[in-house]
Amino acid sequence: MKLIIACTPSGGIGYKNKLPWSKIEGDLPRFNKLTNGKVVVMGRNTWNSLSKKPLPNRTNYIITSDPTIIPFYPASAGTAFATTMRTLDYLNENACIIGGAKLIEGAWGRITEVHLTITFAEYTCDTFIDLLKLSKEFTCNQLSDFPDHSYQIWKRR
């Protein structure tokens, strides 16, 4: 599986269930290109934070301990399924985990590639990912710097 995530230099990914930054230049188009037509997997808090549900042109899996809290969406709106962590056992390597922190922590062993956007600035955050774990278990194979962030692709060792 792939992880697609943006964070601060200290691993901050959210504040009060929202992104802590207003915009990272080029990050949303890159996210759309990486996930369009694919399966995206997210935790319930990430799902709740989306302004548009489900993400269009993607199969959306929402990992939650209570699948009844996710409303049904008609096929015309996109596809969304509420499910549990066991679903990860049945998804292929092209599925993309897009957040949040609890899901990422529980799925680290299944992740083979990380597409990481790191802001150059720090922001106030209350939710973090473990960047130390990333550097211990993965190797950075691509690095591109932009005015406000760095984009990196990491592969499992």
Image (cartoon, rainbow, N blue to C red):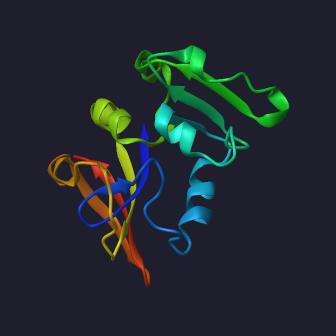
Quadrant assignment for the N terminus? top left
Tally of numbered tags? 0
The reply, left or right, for residue 37 in relation to residue 114 is: right
* Whether residue 20 can be seen here: yes
The reply, left or right, for residue 29 in relation to residue 125 is: right
The reply, left or right, for residue 49 in relation to residue 59 is: left
The picture places residue 101, in percent across and down from the top left corner, at 34, 41
The picture places residue 57, in percent across and down from the top left corner, at 73, 42
Which of 75/138 is in front?
75
Q: Residue at x 18, y 55 (%)?
A: 135
**Residue 44 vertical position relative to residue 25 in the rendered view, above or below:** above
**Residue 108 vertical position relative to residue 14 in the rendered view, above or below:** above
Q: Residue at x 33, y 32 (%)?
A: 107
State the residue lying farthest toward the bottom.
147
**Residue 23 vertical position relative to residue 69 in the rendered view, above or below:** below
Quarter where residue 88 is shown:
top left
Which of 44/28 is in front?
44
**Residue 101 vertical position relative to residue 132 in the rendered view, above or below:** above
The picture places residue 103, in percent across and down from the top left corner, at 37, 33
Q: Residue at x 58, y 63 (%)?
A: 28
* Whether residue 43 can be seen here: no
State the residue lying farthest toward the front.
16
The picture places residue 136, in percent across and down from the top left corner, at 14, 50
Which of 23/60 is in front?
23
Q: Residue at x 67, y 39 (%)?
A: 58
